[in-house]
Image (cartoon, helix red, strand yellow):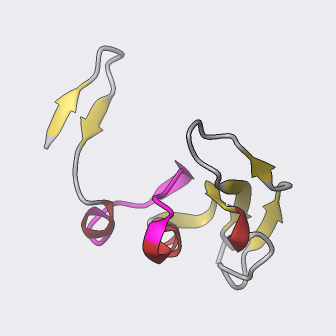
Amino acid sequence: MQGASGEGFRCHQADFLEWANTARSYTKIVMNPPYSKGRALHHLEAAASCLAPGGRLVAILPGSMRGKDLLPGWEVEWTASYQGEFAGTGVNVTILVADKPAQ
């Protein structure tokens, strides 16, 4: 489903994992994937596959993923873990900033 927002941007509603299989290549991706049942990793990998060489991916991820080699060969930085950033949850989160190799 596709439509226009009030700001003039085109919006898409779809299953991200299916959409990523046919998505074009992007130079920047910012995401906050779902966390339950290991879905954060699946969404991160799908987003990484949509990123152009030399592009940057920024993701808000569960704190338990901090420091893991999720994108081998990429240059990555992690923030500290944050607690209580989402109202009504007890989830710890961290932010991953990852740069995909140019080649």
Q: Is residue 41 magenta?
A: no
Q: Which residues are magenta?
A: 19-36
Residue 70 x, y percent position in the rendering: 66, 79
Q: Which residue is located at x 69 percent, y 55 percent?
A: 93
Is 74 on the left or on the right of 30, as rendered?
A: right
Q: Give percent across and percent down for residue 11.
A: 28, 35
Residue placed most toward the observer, 68 or 47: 68
Q: Position of residue 67 (x, y in %)?
A: 80, 74
Single out the residue that lies furthest toward the right. Answer: 80
Residue closer to the observer: 69 or 52: 69
Residue displayed at 73% across by 56% down: 94
Asked if one can make out residue 58 in the rendered structure from this viewpoint, the answer is no
Q: Image point 62% across, 55% down: which residue?
A: 59
Q: Nearer the viewer, residue 78 or 83?
A: 83
Q: Quadrant of residue 62?
A: bottom right
The quarter of the image holding the C terminus is bottom right
Residue furthest to the left: 1
Marks counted in the figure total 0
